[in-house]
C-alpha cells in the first residue's frame, strides 16, 4: 500500500485574505559565535506574510536557516545572509524578514591597580531587518557603572567643613593633628551616596560595516563614564574605584551627555538612543535621563 502524502496545510488558501506584518517564532535556543566565543542566545525570527491568500508561512525553513549562525561569527554580512535565506525560502509569500538575537557578551576586565581580572557580562540584543533593498542592523547594549551624586557630595563636604570648625575652634592648627583628624571617622562625618547605574544604548549601524563594533562601543562608553563596575578587586583597586567616583560626580543628566558625545565620535554609528538609569540609594525611585541623535523609530 502506498504511503499517503502528508498534507501541507500552510499552502492552503486562507479564509480571510489579510496580509500580516510579522509571522515567525520567538525564543529559539541557539549557540552563536562572537569574538571567538560560543554564546548561548535566544533568537526571534520571522517574515512578513504579504500574500493575504496564503494561510501561513513555513516556520521550519526559518528554523533551519538559523544554522548558519552556529558556524559563522556574527557580523552584518552573516545576518544579511540569514535574512536573504528567509526571503528566498518564502518567495512569493514574503517581502520583509526580521531577526533578533538576545545574548550575554562576556568580557574579561582587568582590575584598576592590581594584576587581578574577572569576567563581566553585558546584555546585548542584535536586531536585523531586510526589506529589499533596505537592510539595517540595530544594537541594544546595557552598560553598568557607578554614579555618585554631586549634590550629596557637596552636602557631605559642607558637614565635614562644619565639623572641622567645631573641632578646631580656638586651637592652633597642627599638621599632625589635622592629618589624624582627616583619617578618623570623627572627622569624616558624612559621605556622598552612590548607586549602581545602567546605560541602555540603542544604536543603528552603518549598513556597510564589516564587523559588529560591540566591544569598541562598550569600551568607549565605560571610558566616557569613568566609573565602570569592577570584577575581582584588592583594597588598592577599591581605593582607586573610590577615587574614580570622587572625580566623576554625575547626575543622570551628566551621564547621558557624556555618552551622547562619545557615541557621536564613534565610527559606524548612524543614529542612537540613550537611556540612563540611576537606581537611587537616597530615594525609593530611579532617576532617568534620555538622549538621542538622528533617531527615528523604524
Image: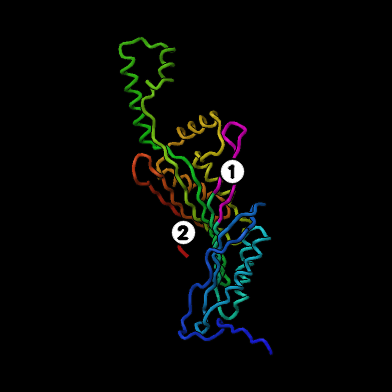
Q: Earlier in the sequence, mark 1 or mark 2?
A: 1
Confirm whether the magenta stretch covers residue 36: no
Q: Which residues are magenta?
A: 103-121
For the residue pair 63 and 257, the one nearer the viewer reads as 63
Residues marked 1 and 2 touching at CB (< 8 Å): no
- Does the rendering let one see residue 137? no
**Where residue 81 sits in the image (x, y, percent)?**
64, 67
- Distance between mark 1 and mark 2 Cα atoms: 32 Å
Query: SS class of the residue under badge 2?
Result: loop
Residue at image position (38%, 12%) is 173
Of all residues shown, which one is farthest toward the top? 172
Instruction: Measuring from the top left, give residue 179's x and y in whole percent.
Output: 44, 16
Q: Is residue 240 left or right of residue 166?
A: right
Secondary structure beneath disc 1? strand
Question: Looking at this view, is 258 or 118 the one in front?
Answer: 118
Q: Quick one: quadrant of the N terminus?
A: bottom right
Q: Is residue 90 positioned above or below 39 on the image?
A: below
Closer to the observer: label 1 or label 2? Answer: 1
Crowdedness of circle 1 by 10 Å Cα count: few (<14), some, many (20+)?
some
Of the numbered discs in the image, which one, if any, rests on residue 295?
2
| Quadrant assignment, res 171 | top left
Q: Mark 1 = which residue?
A: 119
Most distant residue in the bottom direction: 1
Amino acid at each position: 500500500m502506498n504511503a499517503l502524502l502528508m498534507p501541507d496545510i500552510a499552502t492552503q488558501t486562507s479564509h480571510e485574505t489579510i496580509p500580516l506584518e510579522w509571522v515567525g517564532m520567538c525564543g529559539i535556543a541557539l549557540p552563536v559565535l562572537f569574538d571567538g566565543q560560543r554564546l548561548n542566545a535566544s533568537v526571534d525570527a520571522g517574515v512578513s506574510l504579504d500574500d493575504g491568500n496564503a494561510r501561513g508561512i513555513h516556520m521550519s525553513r526559518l528554523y533551519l536557516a538559523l544554522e548558519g549562525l552556529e558556524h559563522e561569527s556574527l557580523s552584518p554580512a552573516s545576518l544579511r545572509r540569514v535574512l536573504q535565506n528567509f526571503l528566498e525560502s518564502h518567495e512569493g509569500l514574503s517581502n520583509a524578514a526580521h531577526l533578533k538575537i538576545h545574548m550575554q557578551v562576556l568580557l574579561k576586565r582587568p582590575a584598576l591597580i592590581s594584576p587581578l581580572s574577572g569576567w563581566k557580562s553585558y546584555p546585548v540584543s542584535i536586531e536585523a531587518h531586510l526589506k529589499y533593498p533596505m537592510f539595517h542592523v540595530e544594537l541594544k547594549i546595557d552598560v553598568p557603572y557607578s554614579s555618585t551624586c554631586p549634590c550629596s557630595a557637596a552636602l557631605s563636604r559642607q558637614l565635614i567643613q562644619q565639623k572641622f570648625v567645631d573641632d578646631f575652634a580656638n586651637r592652633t592648627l597642627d599638621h599632625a593633628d589635622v592629618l589624624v583628624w582627616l583619617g578618623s571617622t570623627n572627622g569624616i562625618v558624612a559621605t556622598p551616596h552612590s548607586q549602581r547605574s545602567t546605560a541602555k544604548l540603542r544604536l543603528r549601524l552603518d549598513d556597510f560595516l564589516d564587523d559588529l563594533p560591540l566591544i569598541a562601543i562598550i569600551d568607549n562608553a565605560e571610558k566616557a563614564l569613568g566609573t565602570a563596575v569592577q570584577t575581582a578587586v584588592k583594597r588598592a583597586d577599591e581605593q582607586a574605584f573610590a577615587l574614580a567616583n570622587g572625580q566623576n560626580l554625575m547626575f543622570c543628566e551628566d551621564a547621558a551627555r557624556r555618552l551622547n558625545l562619545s557615541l557621536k565620535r564613534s565610527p559606524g554609528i548612524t543614529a542612537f538612543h540613550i537611556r540612563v538609569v540611576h537606581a537611587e540609594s537616597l530615594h525609593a525611585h530611579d532617576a532617568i535621563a534620555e538622549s538621542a541623535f538622528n533617531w527615528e523609530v523604524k
